[in-house]
Amino acid sequence: MHYRNLGKSGLKLSAIGLGTNAFGKRADRQTSISIIEQAIERGITFIDTANIYAGTQSETIIGEALKGKREQVVLTTKAGLPAGSGVYDRGSSARHLMTQLEASLRRLQTDHVDLYQIHTFDPHTPLEETLRCLEHMISSGKVRYIGCSNYYAWELMKALGISRQLGISAYISHQTSYSLADRTPERELIPLCLDQGIGIIPYFPLAGGILTGKYVQGIPQGSRAETDPGFNRFFSEHTLVLSKQVAQLAQELGTSPNVLSIAWLLHQPVVGSVIVGATKPEQLLDNLQALELELDASVLQRLDEISAPFKHGEPFAFYRI
């Protein structure tokens, strides 16, 4: 395993992190625990979850799986997206964040999280309130570092400016959709992060499975596209063409399209850790091969050329309240 500092912070993450959105949903409890155990054995130290994944089941399963192993991992969770239908069940107000952090700590069976992320920008709460609340969490020892997700570049820069003005802790990371099928962060967000020393944590590195090539011949049984009807909004003629092109190049290189897609992200200097989900242990082992795949300048140029159109238009995924 390779380890990288997250942005300009001293926090080191495994270059590939474990995404747990499917735990308790598309992966049952025992399978999820097996995946976590396999990940730790293979050197993965970064585990990513959120208060709303699988209706809180993801955090609960992780808490159980990490008994006796908590100090071996860097654990991150999030809050801010709707956790219920009530008026107080979303956003980044101090009230909501404090409530959600305590609930996450109970489910995770720990007294702190290493990285606490605001899941999306809250236009109804002053950033100063959110950042002061996060500073309190750090001073209380319940949070080590803070990050954000699904912010526009101007929102992230405003948050950094407020933290500096107040002399309080600032975001060290931004979690965003980033892949060969979504290069929109390269327009503004990534230049900002490189300039300010913020680490990018890509989610949907395989565009929800589209970059694995499994949808080229249709929708496989049991796939996310079959089990989650809302996922079909991500399909387009352009993404399927890209999927075929990536698969063809991967074949030429003697690797798989998912390994090639993850390796491309690992070659991006702004990336701290690539969040890779799994619903079975063998998927995780397959994706870890990306760590050993070196891409020369000619391959990187070909990937740049076939994915260049995905710098423009709308993001592949972007979650707001």
Image (cartoon, grey):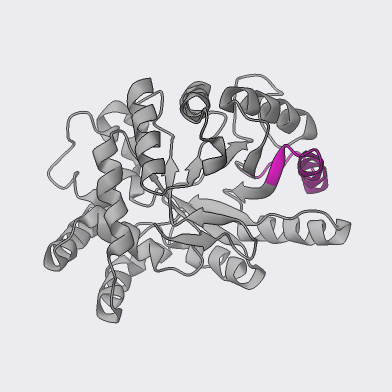
Residue drawn at x 77%, y 53% as measured from the top left: 169
> Which one is in front, 37 or 236?
37
- Residue 32, horizontal then vertical, whole percent: 37, 29
Range shown magenta: 121-144
Give the residue at the far right of this rendering: 166
- Residue 214, horizontal then vertical, whole percent: 19, 44
Residue drawn at x 68%, y 34% as measured from the top left: 91
Residue drawn at x 45%, y 47% as measured from the top left: 317
**Quadrant of the rendered image containing residue 217:** top left
> Which one is in front, 37 or 306?
37
**Quadrant of the rendered image containing residue 320:** top right
Is 291 one of the magenta-colored residues?
Answer: no
Q: Is residue 18 left or right of residue 153?
A: left
Give the residue at the far front of this rendering: 68
Q: Does residue 270 sit above or below 168 in this rendering?
A: below
> Which one is in front, 246 or 155?
246
Which image quarter is the N terminus in?
Answer: bottom left
